[in-house]
Amino acid sequence: MLDILIRGGLIVDGTGNTPYPGDLAISSGRVAGAGRLEGAEAATVIDASGLAVAPGFIDVHSHSDLSLPSHPRATSSLAQGITTEVAGSCGWSLAPVKAETARSVLKELTEGLTGSVPPGLAVQDEKDPHPRRAADEPGQGKNGLAWYSFGDYLTWLENRGLGVNLYPVVGQSLIRAHVVGTDQRRAGPGELAAMKALLEACLEEGARGMSTGRGYSPGRHAPTEEIIELCRVVAGRGGIYTTHIKDESGGLVESVEEAIRIGRESGVKVEVSHHKAVGRSNFGKVRETLAMMEEARRSGVDITCDAYPYAFAQVFSLLGEVPGVRPDQTPEEIEKLLVDHAFREKVTGELVKAAEREGGSLPGVFSRPEHIMMVSVGRDHSLEGQDLGTVFGEVLSGARQPGTAGPDAGGDPAHKRPAAPDPALIRRIVDVGLDLLLAQDLHVNLAAIMSEEDVETVLAHPETLVGTDAFALDRNLGSRTPIHPRHYGTFPRIVGYYRRERRLADLATMVRKVTGLPSRKLGLSDRGTLARGNWADVVVFDPDTLADRATAKEPYLEPTGVKWVVVNGRVALENGKASGTMAGMVLRR
C-alpha cells in the first residue's frame, strides 16, 4: 500500500512539459509514480479534483537560517507552497561563530531583522544590565553558545527539527569576522589562508556554497581579489556563490560586472540575489544587466539571478534607526525620550560618529533619501508612497555629500579620504525625523524604491529564479519588528498574479521557474520535478484562486489557493492549515 495517493489532479511536473490529468503516488518519502493509477490504494488519499499537483516550490534566496531556531515549523513558507529554502544569504549565516561575533555582528543582525537573538546564540554581553543565563535556553554550551562550527549548527537544527528543507550556504561576512574581525582593511596573506581553510571546513561539514553581502560590513571590506580566492575554494567543491552585489542603485552595472568577473576568474557558479535597480534615476538599468549576464553565459560563465515580485525592498522602521531606543521601552517612554532636547543631542552625536565611520557620508537611510519610500505610517496616509527626499525637503539636500566614501563607493575603504560630517545638518535631520515619528504615533515604516516595470522585466526572463529574501515565521513578531509582505506572499504572487493577470508565463513554465529550474542550478537532482524516485516534495494548489493577500500594512495575511503541501513524503499542510509535521531535512553537501 502507498503512503499517499494524490488523485485526480492536473500534474504539472516541473519540467515545463504540458500538464496532464493524473494521480501521484508517494511511498517511503519518494515519488512512486505519476499518471492514471487505477486501483492504487494508500493510507492517505488526497482528492485533487480541479487542482494542480506540482513539485514543492524552491526559494533560492532566504534568510530562514536566522529564524528557524525560533520558528522551526516554517509556517509562513509552507503556506506559500515552499518546501526547500536556500539560506545563509547576503554574507550572513549563524555559523561559524565565536562569542565575540555572536555578541556583536550577529546580535545586531538578528535583533534588527527578527526582533530577538535566536536560541543557541544567547551570549552574555558584559555591558548588558540584564544578564541572560545560558540555562535560559536548552542545549546551550560554554558562553551560551550551542554551536561553533558550521557542521555543529546544522546538527543542532536537525536535532531540533525543521518544517522545510534547508539548503545551507555559509556567509562570507562570518568567515571574515571569524579571522579578520570587523576591521576595515585588507586581509594579510596568513589571514587569507586561514579564511580559505575555514571555508573549506564549512564546505566539508555540509555547506553547499558561500554568499556575500558586498555592501555590508564586515564582508564589504574584502577587495574583489579576496572574494575570487574564496570562490576558487567553493568552485573546487562544486558549490554555488550567491551575492548581494555591492550597489543596486547608481553602481548597479559595475556591481554586476564584479559578479561576472568573480565567476569568470574563479570558475564558480554565480547567483545574483534579489536583482533590482533601486531609485528612480536607475530604473531601466536591469535591461542592461540582464543582457550582461546573457553575454557572460555565452562566454562560459554560469551566472543567473533571482528576484521577488514586489516593487519595494526590505521593510524597516524609522524608529529602529534612532540610537538609544530600546525594544523593551513602552510607547509612552519612547515619546518622552523623543521630545527631550538632551536625547536629541545624544542621537545627533551617535549619528555623527556613524557618519565618520562611513567616511563622512550620512548614515543609513539618509545617505540616499530619494531612494527610500514610506510604505506605512500611523496617521497621515497621504505620506505613504512618498520618498524621504520629498518629506524631509531641503534639510536633506546635502545628504549625499560629494567626495565621500559611502558604503557603495567601491574600492578599498582604507584608502578613502574621509570628509567631516556636518553636525548641524545631522541635528536638523534628527529634529525632522523625530518630529515625524511623534506625529505618526511612532509608526513610520520604510523601504527602498523599485520600479514595477523593472520587476516584471527581471521576472519575465527565462533564466530568472525566485527568492523571497524573507525568513520563515511561525508567529507575529509584533509592531516593533516590521516585515515585508514577501514573507507570506512571494510564490502565490508569482504563480498566481504574475501568471494570470500579468501573463508573464503559462502554468507549466511558471511552475518550472520555481521548481525544476532552481533544482538544476542548485544541483538537487532528486528534487524539483515529479520524476519517479525523487523526494516527494509536493504542493497541491488551485491555479485559479492562488493569490497573495499580504500587504505592507497587513504583512501577515496568508495566501489563498494552497491546499496541501507534502515535504519528504509527509503531509505538512492539510486543507490550507499547517499540520505541525517537522518533515524537513538539512540538505548537506
Image: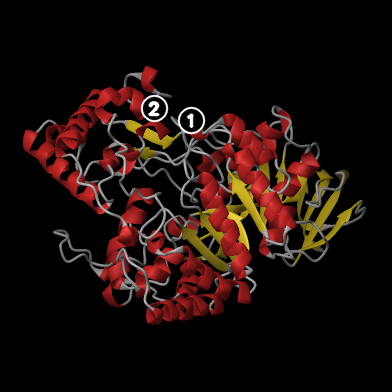
- Tell me if residue 136 comes above or below residue 492 in the rendering: below
Q: Position of residue 507 (x, y in %)?
A: 78, 39
The residue closer to the viewer here, 22 or 497, is 497
Q: CA distance from mark 2 to mark 1?
A: 10 Å
The residue closer to the viewer here, 295 or 206, is 295
Q: Earlier in the sequence, mark 2 or mark 1?
A: 1
Amino acid beneath label 1: Arg
| Residue situated furthest left in the rendering | 342
Q: Position of residue 237 (x, y in %)?
A: 62, 76
The residue closer to the viewer here, 409 or 368, is 409
Residue drawn 88% across and 57% down?
40
In the picture, the quarter occupied by the C terminus is bottom right
In the picture, the quarter occupied by the N terminus is bottom right
Residue drawn 77% across and 46% down?
53
Q: Position of residue 499 (x, y in %)?
A: 72, 34
- Tell me if residue 260 comes above or below residue 351 in the rendering: below
Position of 487 with respect to 353 (left or right) is right
The residue closer to the viewer here, 332 or 362, is 362
- How many marks on residues? 2
Q: Residues within 10 Å of mark 2 (few under 14, many from 20)?
A: many
Q: Position of residue 250 (x, y in %)?
A: 47, 41
Label annotation for residue 280:
1
Residue drawn 39% across and 50% down?
409
Q: Is residue 164 visible?
A: no
Marks 2 and 1 in Cβ contact (< 8 Å): no
Q: Residues within 10 Å of mark 1 (few under 14, many from 20)?
A: few
- Tell me if residue 533 comes above or below residue 46 in the rendering: below
Report helix, strand or loop for mark 1.
helix
Report helix, strand or loop for mark 2.
loop
Residue at the spot of label 2: 387
User: What colour scheme does the image use?
Assistant: secondary structure
